[in-house]
């Protein structure tokens, strides 16, 4: 088995990870460090992050993905579908943080899944599966479905509600964990079930998070 190589991160990148997530084991530290090199390399070939945003990889994409962990610590055996994963967000960072949770990363664009598969193989993530298919075609059930500004919630919810397992195993009810910014009151008010909105600026001090939120939809 190939060992993960050590890629030293710049101090600013280190601070983003270790300031907010202080209980990482050595292997997780190495995996996050390696992301700082893998994504720019792949993004130069297949654009999964905007060219102007790649310099903000850790803050805008990795930490943003990991913000879900400020609300829930997945119990071992939890199953999560990352619908419309793109280049692997939030699925890949979460899979590093929760090695005992299984993540199914789904996207209909083959070149994006190619990047996901290459990065998960390079990191030796055994808790990740990837599928190149429209997520609304998936019939399997999961404890949670994650998404990151894939579409309006009024469109997203009907496509994935069939994928939510009824029996709960975590501290919060099974449902959708959705990362989005902006004003959401009107959008959420039209949805069935219950919505809990977490303001991410409560957990992170950077200006990027001032308008960012995590929405937990459940009991729909």
Image (cartoon, grey):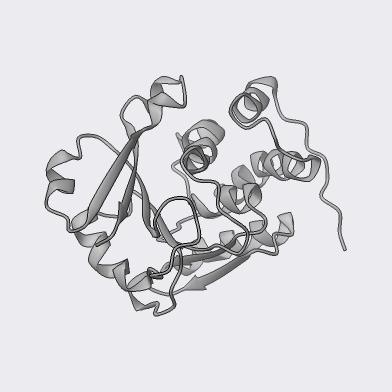
| Residue 135 screen position, x and y as percent | 38, 70
Q: Is residue 88 visible?
A: no
The residue sitting at 64% across, 22% down in the picture is: 15
Residue 136 in view: yes
Of 171 and 54, nearer the camera is: 171
* Pick the front one: 150 or 188: 188
Q: Name the residue rendered at 58%, 59% in the picture.
A: 115
73 vs 1, nearest the viewer? 73
Q: Residue at coordinates 66% horizontally, 47% vertically from top-left?
A: 38
Count of all numbered marks drawn on residues in the image: 0
Residue 185, by quadrant, is top left
Q: Quadrant of the N terminus?
A: bottom right
Q: Provide residue 59's location: percent of width, then percent of height.
A: 51, 31
Q: Is residue 216 above or below residue 209?
A: below
User: Where is 58 relative to 191, above or below?
Assistant: above
Is the residue 152 above or below the residue 130 in the image? above
Residue sitting at x 66%, y 27% = 18
Asked if residue 35 lies left or right of residue 60, the reply is: right
- Could you tell whether 56 is left or right of 33 in the image? left
Q: Quadrant of residue 117?
A: bottom right
Which x, y percent locates residue 28?
Answer: 73, 44
Q: Quadrant of the C terminus?
A: bottom left
Q: Nearer the viewer, residue 78 or 170?
A: 170
């Amino acid at each position: 088995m190939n060992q993960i190589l050590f890629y030293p991160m710049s101090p600013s990148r280190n601070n983003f990870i270790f300031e907010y997530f202080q209980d990482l084991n050595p292997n997780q530290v190495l995996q996050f460090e390696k992301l700082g090199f893998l994504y720019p390399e792949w993004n130069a070939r297949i654009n999964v992050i905007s060219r102007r945003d790649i310099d903000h990889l850790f803050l805008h994409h990795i930490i943003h993905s990991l913000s879900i962990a400020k609300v829930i610590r997945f119990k071992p055996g939890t199953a999560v579908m990352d619908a419309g994963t793109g280049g692997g967000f939030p699925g890949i960072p979460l899979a590093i943080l929760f090695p005992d949770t299984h993540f199914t990363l789904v996207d209909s664009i083959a070149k994006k899944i190619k990047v996901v598969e290459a990065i998960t193989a390079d990191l030796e993530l055994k808790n990740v599966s990837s599928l190149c298919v429209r997520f609304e075609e998936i019939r399997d059930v999961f404890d949670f479905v994650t998404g990151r500004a894939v579409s309006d919630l009024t469109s997203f919810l009907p496509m994935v509600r069939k994928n939510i397992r009824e029996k709960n195993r975590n501290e919060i009810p099974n449902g959708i964990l959705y990362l989005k910014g902006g004003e959401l009151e009107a959008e959420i008010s039209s949805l069935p079930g219950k919505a809990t909105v977490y303001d991410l600026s409560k957990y992170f001090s950077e200006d990027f998070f001032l308008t960012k939120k995590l929405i937990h939809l459940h009991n729909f």
